[in-house]
Image (cartoon, coloured by chain):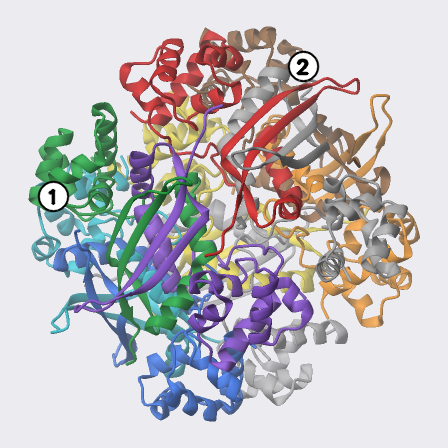
Chain colours: A yellow, C cyan, D blue, E green, F purple, G orange, H brown, I red
């Protein structure tokens, strides 16, 4: 058994039961972004969170334990994603990569936006010309230090 | 002469003059995100915007014309970015890619967040534990259609 | 179980039964292009379409549900396709890529042809020198916006 | 001197003069698709076509000769295109690749759509919901033969 | 079941029975080059050819049907082949690639040698200094056309 | 100065003078296949051959010496060739690679067709359905030896 | 002018003058590790540090300014380093990568060792069996957070 | 059975039993770094070490034997690691690669730090601003020799 | 069943029985280099050799037959080997590649060292400073020929 | 100026003067293998060796200094070499890689053959069936150590 198999079981169970990530997240008591990532094998659950998920997805005790192990992260099977929904994010990095860099350095100096001390919120933005996907990212600025 | 050479001239001119993207953007009358991307060869200027930039960076008439040509987009020299500031965004796509996909489909159905009808805003988020980089992305949802 | 396994079951079933995509499409009530793509795991069915396909290919209830889940798109196992029939399309992108770009920008300004709000029609074009494959593609033009 | 340098000179000249591909094509007496591809180093001109282009772009006699040499085709600097306008075509190959293959074989039997005995027409398709890019491709079907 | 599994069954059966491609080809009534390629999943059989092969390799009815389906071509597991016998052909393309191109264009004008309307013959060439592999390739010349 | 620069000078000179490889080969006294490859930097000339080529292409004494140095072979800028004329040969290796291997081993036992002790002849094959490119390859069979 | 050209000028100047990184670092007043990285275009100098370096390497005012611009990091020309001295570090990541991960998680929980809030010290470790390279790395632990 | 399967069994067993590498290492009588690497298939055990591990993880006699076979090293599934915890080490090689090289050569002359005659120690470094990961690496310097 | 499975069975059998390649080679009556390569699926056995190996490794009749089939060569799972013991050989090719080429051409003229008509001997070289691996390679020189 | 430019100057000078590596090596007083590698930018010279080479190739004082700087090693422009003479060595690693590994471990235990404490000798081996390239490699065995 591996974490990958647990992830596949979770996804299959979700499809079969017709569940929603938002509802699952509410039961876990965390944001839908974090809980979805956790279910997809990208975040680590504590005992209580794992128990909630194990119940929802009918996991065995051993499978539940895998949810509490730090996963090997990276959810994409290829270096450049092929799925159009995911590719658009890669495209943003490609088109705006140097812009992100310039503006972060201009505002904060030399350093990075942390992808670890990080949170995000994805929601619907109503718009008469067609609704929009709205994503707010917030990552701690980490300065390079001299030594 | 090529757009790449114009971009390099702009960057060198900015370094030598010690300018800020925010100030340049104000003169152009557009957001700092769009103007920075335009200067870095990722967006297309109109006549008036190009004139402002040409004056700031002391571009020739021919160089100014390049700013009005749709550029060949893609600002990264490698498939996986090596610069840590830019890499963190690639990492977010890698770790959260499937999460983005799941949540967009759950909320909107089958489709994508447009990277074309798209805007963003990057700013400082004050935090006593260390200030944070805050990025708000807004892209139109585009549904896949049956036919 | 995964969508990939459902796709393989569909393909095997089609080979064994000796069915035609055009006939399947007619039963679904959609174009042969969209229905073929859906069966191959690239488009999402609604309840009724999934039911028709489930009956044709003798899918289980769980397998049918997979047809209604947005798939992870990308039908090629390698970055550059090796199959000659598919490669010729990649070759067209390689040879005509910059031409597509120039002509779209000349006619529409800066933007793209959507691959999401997109439809196509592939048919036989009679020709005394040998019949031709005729493909009509129609994708919405999406302009880059300033902000 | 190389064909690449001639191509760059042509592009720079076009930008500086503010010409349109459609107008250039009319002077050459061929479609805008073929003439654009030829100028971008993907097709071969005959003596008369090269003369017209040489005059438009003020090429030297040696540069004109390069237009009459069969070029080394392939207009993309990377295996997967980074420019969004071009990428969408790659995405179509990725998403619809197996669909193209299935439908061509269903209609014609085993073989390919030629990318050599090929022509295409790209035009604006009026639409109240937003105009569309319309591309008609026509390539001779070439059957695999037994021997 | 997939075509790949049928191919593996054919190869295993051939090894176990100790058959020769030349003999198999004779029973099929086609050249050894075409029949070998067909058995290895690169060509499509008709009903009668498939029946002969099914009998030789003791295939089931379903497996036989796969022989009549146009295969997904490409017999190499890596972009650059690692097997020395196959690599030498890749090396010829690498060393002589530009030479092939120059000589085809010099003799025929702009176009290609078809790899579809193609046949070949591989045989032993007696030589006192050591026998040689002799391969005759014949592919229809396809000219690029203006439009 | 490098061999690459000599090659480029030769190509430019050939284009400007409007020469033919067949004529050049005749002056050198070798086949058009070998002479073209030599001019393109894939074969090594002796003193006399280099002198003939130096005269034809108006090379300096130093440039002529480069023709007599064993070149660093490999004429393709990418692992998978993008030019359609050259790609078709790569496609043949991909589609027929395992067939070449099977038939060579069946006829000769374990070993390879040499790409070093190798010669080839490319010519026009008259055909009422359209002329064909005919290539005869002859490479010494080299057996793997036990030790 | 670009940062890369400044880096090359610095390296050439160091070779020609026969300087040592340790001595340069002492003048700058920072560790040899940080100063070397800064000179090689991987760290950002402040005004005073840049002035010291500009004097040592006889940089122009414009070149000095580049030292104060956040660089585009990544010092390796290939994904897998070819130089044996650098490759050994890549090998350590390859062999010990999962071990690093396991031990960091066991000691600290889910998170990473920062490569930004990071310092290191490389020195000689005397050993009768042959001196050893001793490297002490110290990076802040950054925990993944729930949200 | 293969070493990979033994590794997977060890990891699963560790997760299920909730063991710690440090405790396992103590029983083996070697450092936690070496023992973890050994369990993950990167180091070779002797008879006695393998017996201890076999008992802990309930391995069969055959599985135990695999622990004593020199493994095929390399713990990463991709050339560039995707897991953020491991990636940071790759980033250090990328950012500091040329710095490592310069400083090793300055101190020791031409040669490398051995990754074979190598040991390391990873521990917690207390820090009021947040604890740090502290890694001490020690590898024998190996000089290039003239001959 | 495939040759790969036979190879895995041989390796597992060798590990379980605790055999040595040198002893196996002696029974086969060939060098340890050739026999090891043959067992690892890189060389082809004759009837008698296969019988000896089948007995040692307790292979079935079908498995034994696979040893007599020319294998698909290439023993590395990645283009650049990750295992340090194997990587060092790749490193030698990388560092000494151009040196090999220069010296072979200087001594023999234009051509290659055959990797087919090749043999080698790997043995221990006693040395008071630490024993050395000594490898003698002998490959027939094959000259490029003019034609 | 860079080491690469010095290497190119050396190669050009050798071609123009018609020198031999063996003669150059004799003047330097080292083996032809080491001296060739040094001239090609893969080894580091001391003051006296650099002086000899500088005189032979008419290098400036600055160029001579580059010969004394540890080079960035790696002589191949591509991961898999395209030149046939060099490729054969890569092929040996590919075909014999696992054999090298097995035999080194069988004779010496777990460890590697050093590519640093390494020397080699390439010479002609007379043979009535055609002379052979004979290469003797000798690298110190380095054992992996427990800690």
Circle 2: element type: loop
Work out whether D58 lies above or below H68: below
Q: Position of residue C31 (x, y in %)?
A: 15, 61
Q: CA distance from mark 1 to mark 2?
A: 68 Å
| Front position in the image: I14 or E85 | E85
Q: Tell me where residue A20 sits by quadrant.
A: top left
The residue at 52%/85% (across/down) is D62
Q: Are marks 1 and 2 in contact (CB under 8 Å)?
A: no
The residue at 40%/35% (across/down) is F111
Q: Tell me where residue A108 sits by quadrant.
A: bottom right
Q: Position of residue C24 (x, y in %)?
A: 10, 52
Which label number is shown at residue H85?
A: none
Identify the chain of the residue marked 1, using the numbered disc in the image. Answer: E
Q: Tell me where residue D39 sits by quadrant.
A: bottom left
Q: Position of residue A18 (x, y in %)?
A: 26, 41
| Image side of residue D92 versus residue G87, left or right | left
Residue C16 visible from this viewpoint: yes
| Front position in the image: D119 or A52 | D119
* Image quadrant occupied by the N terminus of chain I: top left
Identify the chain of the residue marked 2, using the numbered disc in the image. Answer: H
Number of residues whose C-alpha sits closer than 10 Å to that of mark 2, classed few (under 14), some (14–19) or many (20 or more): some
Circle 2 sits on which residue? H30
Q: Position of residue F7 (x, y in %)?
A: 57, 67
| Image side of residue H68 versus residue D89, left or right | right
């Amino acid at each position: 058994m591996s974490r990958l198999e647990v992830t596949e079981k979770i996804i299959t169970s979700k499809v079969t039961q017709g569940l929603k990530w938002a509802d699952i997240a509410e039961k876990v008591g965390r944001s839908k972004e974090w809980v979805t990532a956790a279910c997809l094998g990208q975040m680590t659950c504590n005992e209580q969170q794992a128990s909630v998920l194990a119940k929802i997805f009918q996991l065995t005790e051993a499978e539940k334990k895998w949810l509490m192990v730090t996963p090997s992260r990276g959810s994409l099977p290829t270096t450049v994603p092929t799925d159009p929904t995911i590719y658009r994010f890669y495209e943003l990095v490609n088109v705006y990569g140097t812009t992100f860099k310039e503006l972060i350095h201009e505002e904060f100096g030399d350093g990075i936006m942390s992808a670890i001390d990080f949170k995000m919120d994805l929601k619907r933005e109503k718009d008469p010309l067609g609704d929009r996907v709205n994503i707010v990212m917030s990552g701690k600025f980490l300065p390079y230090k001299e030594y």
